[in-house]
Amino acid sequence: MTEALVPTLAGCVVVVTADRRSAELGAALERRGATVRHAPAMSIVPHAEDAALLRATEEIATTPPDVVVVTTGIGFRGWVEAADAAGLADQLLATLARVRLVARGPKARGAIQAVGLQADWVAESESSAEIAQALLDDGVAGLRIAVQHHGAGADGLDEAFAAAGAHVQGLVVYRWGAAPDPAAVAASVRATAAGDVDAVVFTSAPGASAWLAAGDDEGVSGALVRRFREGTVAAAVGPVTARPLVARGIEPLVPDRGRLGSLVRALVGHVGGLPPVPTLAGSLQVRRGAAVLDGRVLPLSPSGLEVLRLLVAAGGAVVPRRAVLAALPGASTDPHAAEVAIARLREAAGSRDLVRTVVKRGYRLGVADDLLALRASGDGRG
């Protein structure tokens, strides 16, 4: 079976806060069984037809600078696409092949490599401060430096280089705009605060800041921090993206490499690595939207999942019939309704060992610790 078909994230509800490439990211998560909620916290507004960008591109293509700083992969790709639309792509790429290319992190380096070029130096910390320090240490007086800005601005690079005697040209390829669906963002922060979400995925620092700000607006920021500390996963594509989360006291999951594929693999490894509950019927994991037994998603109704969640929470202790009835829809007091719910659980699991009946008391999860006692006593399971 291929990795794409293994339901590692089955039953997990994942919020994707990205705008660009959100469909690609969401599809990768869904292939692994996750239920994905799209809530882009910000939009990306391209400047592909901006006259100033095209004039700057033409100037760079005809009069090469000494250094070109690439701050984002999306910005560099957008710049090349804008040049291509204006008939300048070949000339621009030929020029960039002759200048010193500086990349802010692995995503920027990847975009440079995608057009057949190589970065001469990469800021592995993904910070503009590291770029500024490295170039200023080398000396920039009299150099012509072009800086491709990211959506939130130049981070002081233009000013720092100009103050050191460089001639600086800024390139604005895109900017961050408002959330395309503010209601979806508001709903996502409320759902996360309420405990209805397993993971929230972030792919940019401005997007992370905007999503957290939505939590402030909804009055649930404190609840969000508590949820993330108690087990809800915040997953950030890189250390720069993680900073707004860390500033709020949230420790995100960050992959070793700043790529979407690495982010998905890190999330899969984290969730798949959470300790399952060993039961007599097999290894059980209960998530927000499903239960997985030995890698198989159990065909449970929402009420059946709630009953199973109740049994797991009890950790093998007896759950009275009245508690089982309270987890079912309606207000039934008929013991038969509880018996039917338990029977359906066993049927879905394909094993009567998942739930054991404790006569006149209720039900309990058939945990693995029961196995030795079961073998010793020959006790039947009701």
Image: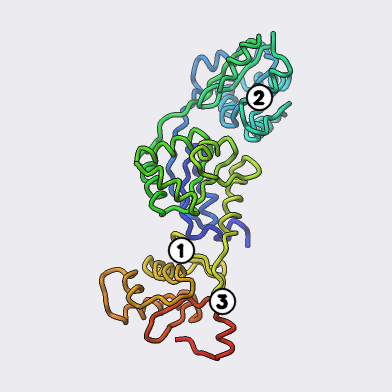
Please name the residue that numbered disc 3 is placed on: 368
- Mark-to-mark CA distance, 3 and 1: 21 Å
The amino acid marked with disc number 1 is Ala
Instruction: Look at the numbered discs 1 and 2 and tell me whether their residues touch, using CB distance below 8 Å.
Output: no
Please name the residue that numbered disc 2 is placed on: 131
The amino acid marked with disc number 3 is Ala
**Regarding mark 1 in the picture, which secondary structure is present there?**
loop
Residue drawn where x is 60% and y is 50% of the image: 266
Q: Nearer the viewer, residue 187 or 225?
A: 225
On screen, residue 286 above or below 209: below
Q: Nearer the viewer, residue 257 or 138?
A: 138
**Dot 3 or dot 1, earlier in sequence:** 1
**Regarding mark 3 in the picture, which secondary structure is present there?**
loop
Instruction: Look at the numbered discs 2 and 3 and tell me whether their residues touch, using CB distance below 8 Å.
Output: no
Give neighbour class at mark 1: few <14, some 14-19, many 20+ (Cα, 10 Å).
many
* Residue 14 image position (x, y, % from top left): 47, 51
The amino acid marked with disc number 2 is Ile
* Residue 51 image position (x, y, % from top left): 50, 15
| Quadrant in the picture for residue 257 | top right
Give neighbour class at mark 2: few <14, some 14-19, many 20+ (Cα, 10 Å).
many
Please name the residue that numbered disc 1 is placed on: 290
